[in-house]
Image: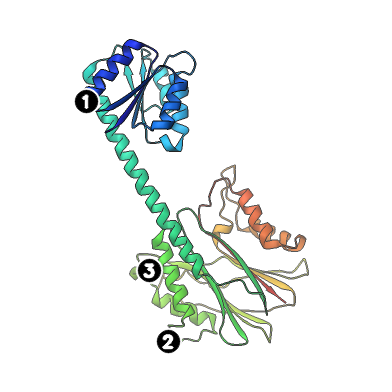
């Protein structure tokens, strides 16, 4: 049985609405002022509220604003009862959050029809809210599963740490690092286009494929060959039109050499104690899955002692600022360089900076940053 709350300071209106609505089979509560109406609404969480606009104390607009700001009452259908019928007054009511209006004197058939329509919309809103909560719970579980697959931080012989903040919708970020043998370390980070499980599942597939070395006869020590194999395996025509960017590198710790290849991914940032030495590591290449005949190339660099490599997804710099502009890659590289040279905990400071910079409660995309410190 639907619960309806009537808020009106006129006893005659209270009696009329209570009798009319109870005849329709609804459970009706009646209060005579806005303060009591809010208190009753918080306790009973009615499906629909009929509230007089003009009352002593809190007006109907005040009550409406309060009700609509309460997450627990967000699906309550709110009808303003008023003798005001100008367009300007109705605009005020709509701006306050009112869902409908009934003009005095009350016409019984109109009232019953509007209540029925309001309750249908309330039920639809409640169903949508429930489905949204289920979806958010599933995405949260998926994010937890992705976290469970990520590697643990490494202390020796290299110091590797990372941050991973999944967006509310869950993007397609995934990364890994592991020893191919005693001397060679593989490192990669990928970002699948789009959001939700359709973006996350391909990322997990790539991680499992590379971690298990399931691509036969593939030289995992050669980054360009790894990207060529992934491109042949994950063509978007067969992957729900999903493609991904990736940065893949192999580090030889004895020779201190890094070979890398990238496919449409932002450049890795290599920093050393020499403040003027900033290298952006990237090779030309389309994202994995876009075109079947793409051939990828390798880049090469020597790794100085006490240098640090940052690999990241575009969610780390495509951040909406308060003025509506995006932070941008160049600004991100400058901030990473600055925190690296001025902070003893650069990764933590970078993350705190980005969280403070973001103008929204959550990030629009997954935010992933790998920090590899070469001793």
* Residue count near mark 1 (Cα–Cα under 10 Å), binned few <14, some 14–19, many ≥20: few
Q: State the residue position of label 1.
A: 24
Please provide percent x and percent y for residue 181. 58, 87
* Label 2 residue SS: loop
Q: Is residue 234 above or below residue 93?
A: below
Going from N to C along the chain, the mark reached first, 3 or 2, is 2
* Label 3 residue SS: helix
Image-quadrant location for residue 266? bottom right
State the CA–CA distance, disc 3 to disc 2. 21 Å
Left or right: where 341 falls relative to 329: right
Q: Residue at x 26, y 30 (%)?
A: 117
Q: Quadrant of the C terminus?
A: bottom right
Going from N to C along the chain, the mark reached first, 1 or 2, is 1
Image-quadrant location for residue 20? top left
State the CA–CA distance, disc 1 to disc 2. 71 Å
Please provide percent x and percent y for residue 156. 67, 78
Q: State the residue position of label 3.
A: 236
Left or right: where 103 falls relative to 243: left
Q: State the residue position of label 2.
A: 216
Left or right: where 164 falls relative to 202: right
Please state which of the two labelled residues, at mark 1 or mark 3, is closer to the viewer.
1
Image-quadrant location for residue 233? bottom left
Please state which of the two labelled residues, at mark 3 or mark 2, is closer to the viewer.
2
Q: Quadrant of the N terminus?
A: top left
**Circles 3 and 2: CB atoms closer than 8 Å:** no
Q: Is residue 182 above or below residue 289?
A: below
| Residue closest to the eye, 267 or 294 | 267
């Amino acid at each position: 049985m639907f619960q309806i709350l009537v808020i009106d300071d006129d006893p005659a209106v209270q009696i009329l609405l209570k009798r009319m609505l109870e005849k329709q089979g609804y459970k009706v509560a009646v209060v005579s002022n806005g303060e009591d109406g809010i208190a009753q609404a918080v306790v009973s969480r009615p499906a629909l509220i009929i509230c007089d606009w003009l009352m002593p104390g809190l007006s109907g607009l005040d009550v409406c604003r309060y009700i609509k700001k309460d997450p627990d009452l967000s699906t309550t259908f709110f009808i303003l009862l008023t003798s005001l019928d100008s367009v300007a007054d109705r605009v005020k009511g709509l701006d306050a959050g009112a869902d409908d209006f009934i003009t005095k004197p009350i016409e019984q058939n109109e009232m019953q029809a509007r209540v029925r329509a309001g309750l249908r919309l309330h039920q639809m809103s409640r169903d949508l809210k429930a489905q949204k909560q289920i979806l958010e719970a599933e995405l949260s579980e998926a994010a937890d599963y992705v976290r469970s697959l990520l590697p643990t931080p490494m202390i020796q012989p290299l110091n590797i740490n990372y941050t991973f903040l999944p967006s509310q919708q869950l993007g397609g970020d995934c990364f890994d690092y592991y020893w191919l043998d005693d001397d060679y370390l593989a490192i990669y980070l990928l970002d699948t286009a789009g959001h939700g499980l359709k973006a996350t599942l391909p990322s997990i597939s790539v991680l499992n494929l590379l971690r298990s070395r399931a691509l036969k006869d593939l030289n995992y020590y050669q980054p360009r060959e790894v990207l060529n194999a992934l491109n042949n395996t994950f063509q978007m025509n067969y992957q729900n039109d999903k493609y991904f960017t990736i940065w893949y590198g192999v580090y030889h710790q004895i020779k201190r050499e890094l070979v890398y290849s990238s496919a449409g991914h932002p450049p890795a940032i290599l920093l050393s104690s020499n403040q003027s030495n900033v290298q952006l590591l990237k090779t030309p290449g389309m994202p994995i899955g876009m075109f079947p005949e793409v051939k990828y190339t390798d880049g090469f660099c020597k790794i100085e002692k006490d240098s640090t490599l940052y690999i990241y997804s575009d969610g780390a710099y495509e951040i909406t600022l308060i003025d509506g502009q995006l932070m941008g890659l160049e600004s991100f590289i400058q901030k990473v360089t600055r925190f690296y040279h001025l902070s003893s905990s650069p990764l933590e400071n970078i993350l705190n900076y980005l969280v403070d910079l973001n103008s929204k409660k959550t990030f629009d995309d997954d935010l992933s940053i790998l920090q590899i410190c070469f001793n």
